[in-house]
Amino acid sequence: MSLLSDPERASAVSDVRALICASGQEAAVLRREAGENLYGHDEGQFDEVGTIPLELNRTPPDDLPGDIDAVASVLPEADVRAEDRLLAEGETYRVQAVVQERLFGVVTHKSLRLVKIDAG
């Protein structure tokens, strides 16, 4: 037995979508060309593959590991992968992890764990 009805599930997804979009923030998603990552190096050419709405939080909760500089909430259909780059508000971040967030079985959004990449 499900704790939420289908309309309640749809409402939850819709509400989270509205919150993410209401933030007014966007990020460019940058991805390395296929075959470009030799031996796990974190270098190479990253090309923009699109932009996505997000809600960016530069002060992550205390329960996240110390090596995370920011977290972002994105829409569930956003094509973002671990090791992609995000260019948001003049900063570049490496996506460390992508986690699907669920509310009683329905995916409401994705959470991205981000590490800031210094320009110098």
Image (spheres, rainbow, N blue to C red):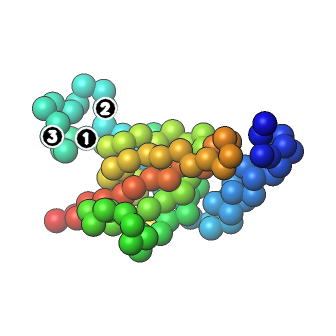
| Image quadrant in which you'd find residue 76 | top right
Spatial CA span between label 2 and label 1: 7 Å
The three-letter amino acid code for the residue at tag 1 is Gln
Is label 1 in contact with label 3 (beta carbons under 8 Å)? no
- Residue 98 in sight in this render: yes
Q: Is residue 25 left or right of 81 when viewed as pictured?
A: right
State the residue at coordinates (18%, 44%).
Answer: 43
Q: Is residue 64 above or below residue 32?
A: below
SS type, badge 1: loop
What residue lies at 17% left-to-right and 36% top-to-bottom? 40
Q: Are marks 2 and 3 in contact (CB under 8 Å)?
A: no
The residue that appears at 21% across and 33% down in the rendered structure is: 37
Of discs 2 and 3, which sits in the foreground? 3
Q: Which numbered disc, 2 or 3, marks the residue that appears first in the sequence?
A: 2
Q: Are marks 2 and 1 in contact (CB under 8 Å)?
A: yes
Residue 84 at least partly seen:
no
* Front residue of this view, candidates 36 and 18: 18
Q: Which residue is mark 3?
A: 41
Q: CA distance from mark 2 to mark 3?
A: 13 Å
Residue 106, horizontal then vertical, whole percent: 68, 42
Q: CA distance from mark 1 to mark 3?
A: 12 Å
Residue extending furthest toward the front? 1
Q: Which mark is residue 17?
A: none
Q: Nearer the viewer, mark 1 or mark 3?
A: 3
- Residue under label 1, please give it: 45
Q: Which residue is nearer to you in this view: 54 or 9?
A: 9
Amino acid type at circle 2 is Glu
Where is residue 33 shown, x and y percent of the image? 31, 32
Of label 2 and label 1, which has the lower sequence position? 2
Can you tell which mark lies on residue 33? 2
